[in-house]
Amino acid sequence: MYSLTLPRLTVLAAAGTCLLLTACGDANAPAPASEPPAAVSETTPAPAPSVPSAPITGEWAALQSANGKYPSQSGLLENSVISQPLKVLLGDKFDAFKTNMQVESPLQQDGDVLYLSGNKPHQGGSDAAYLLVNPQTKALEVGLWQGGKLEVLKTPGSDIRKPADIQTMISNASS
């Protein structure tokens, strides 16, 4: 059995303090050189842009004032620069689209794409909709679920990138 005398206790206490300081590091010491971040795999998709790559100009620039607002507050579907093109695109499905947008999200922006989504009250799994707008190309895309079946209507010749929220919506609906 070992006996701990005062000199041994002092040495042990000093050694313990040194170990603790070494483990915790010195706040005034320069930070050690860090490893460079690992290279991103080419198969990893780049994050979607969150700011427009070019400013919205022309008459569709007015859509910027609706960004962050609910369509029912901003008049986006009824009294905006996209109202008439949207009604032409949807034709007799415009009323179903409005019904499926009653529980609505605010207009959001992801890069050059403005978008919103919604659903018919208490029918989110079967009657829902989304709207994509590309103000640069003046293109629209609508996804309209009726009775659980998705129909996509879009400006002829257009191909609007779907933001992650809309991709998730589509994925969840098909599950």
Image: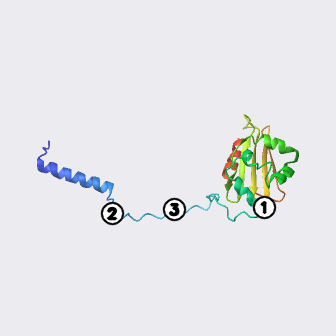
Q: Quadrant of residue 19?
A: bottom left
The residue wearing badge 2 is 29
Q: Which of the two discs, 1 and 3, sits closer to the camera?
A: 1
- How many residues crowd mark 1 within 10 Å: few (<14), some (14–19), many (20+)? few
Q: Which mark is residue 24?
A: none
Question: Going by the image, does 57 lie left or right of 33?
Answer: right
User: Of marks 1 and 3, which one's residue comes earlier in the chain?
Assistant: 3
In three-dimensional space, the C-alpha distance between marks 1 and 3, rounded to whole angstroms, equals 45 Å
Residue beneath the point at 61% across and 62% down: 42
Q: Residue 132, image x and y in percent?
A: 75, 53
The residue wearing badge 3 is 38
Residue beneath the point at 77% across and 41% down: 100
Pick the residue in front: 124 or 9: 124
Q: Amino acid at mark 2?
A: Ala
Q: Residue 136, image x and y in percent?
A: 75, 62
- Residue 121 against residue 77 in the figure, above or below: above
- Identify the secondary structure beneath mark 1: helix
- Identify the secondary structure beneath mark 2: loop
The tally of labels here is 3
Q: Amino acid at mark 1?
A: Glu
Question: Going by the image, does 70 lie left or right of 30?
Answer: right
Q: Is residue 161 visible?
A: no
